Image (tube, grey):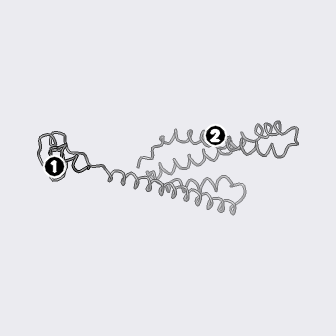
Amino acid sequence: MDTGRDPCPYRILDDIGGAFCMGAGGGTIWYAVKGWRNSPRGDRISGMVTGVKSRAPVLGGNFAVWGMMFSSIDCSLAALRRKEDPWNSIMAGAATGGLLVARGGRKAMIRQAAMGGILLGLIEGLNIFISQQLAGAEDQQVGMQVAAPPPVSAVLSGTRGPENSAMIDAASQSFDINKASINIQ
């Protein structure tokens, strides 16, 4: 199954960079609003800038660590199972969730692994659903092809086929201006 993604060693680096950008971008918005709200009236802009400079890169780094661990586990599972399917992502999400809270003990690991697996299961299920809906829409568009008009040579030569006989009949009738003027009056 071609997923349209880079091969595994490059996928890990791509996911690290993408996760860092998402975390830093989201952190910029979050900490800008938080810095604005928590600063006194005269210092709101400087409080906003300070909050973004101090916390947004940290959040980006946290996202990058999650992306690195997830992609590494996903690629390892793909290599072990020799398959690229949604189960790799679901298992990688569960393992990542569990490993990131390993210092919190077994109970926290189990809880976060279940949450990671459920979250990635929902994401993969939604991805499959959207893919199937888009594929169904493309199939319907292919089935609704417009019929081609009759060839010009058939119309001009007067050969009649079942589909264009009415058009040829209308084209071959002569037009009489006297008859048309009588119908108008």
Q: What element carries label 1?
A: helix
Residue 70 appears at what percent x and percent y?
58, 49
- Do tag 2 and tag 1 residues touch (Cβ < 8 Å)? no
Q: In this view, does 105 lie to the left or right of 145?
A: right
Q: What residue lies at 25% left-to-right and 46% top-to-bottom?
A: 148
The residue under label 1 is 169
Q: What residue lies at 11% left-to-right and 45% top-to-bottom?
A: 159
Q: What element carries label 2?
A: helix
Q: In this view, does 151 lie to the left or right of 129?
A: left
Residue 83 appears at what percent x and percent y?
44, 52
Residue 153 appears at what percent x and percent y?
15, 39
Q: What residue lies at 66% left-to-right and 52% top-to-bottom?
A: 100
Most foreground residue, 173 or 26 = 173
The residue under label 2 is 21
Answer few, some or many: residues within 10 Å of disc 1's Cα (few below 14, many 20 plus, some between 14 and 19).
Answer: few
Residue 171 appears at what percent x and percent y?
18, 44
Distance between the Cα atoms at labels 2 and 1? 68 Å
Could you tell me the amino acid type at mark 2?
A: Cys
Q: Nearer the viewer, mark 2 or mark 1?
A: 1
Q: Quadrant of residue 26?
A: top right
- Pick whichever of labels 2 and 1 is earlier in the sequence: 2
Could you tell me the amino acid type at mark 1?
A: Asp
Q: What residue lies at 19% left-to-right and 40% top-to-bottom?
A: 152
**Compared with residue 126, is residue 51 higher up or lower down, i.e. above or below?**
above
Answer few, some or many: residues within 10 Å of disc 2's Cα (few below 14, many 20 plus, some between 14 and 19).
Answer: some
Q: In this view, does 136 lie to the left or right of 151?
A: right
Most foreground residue, 10 or 121 = 121
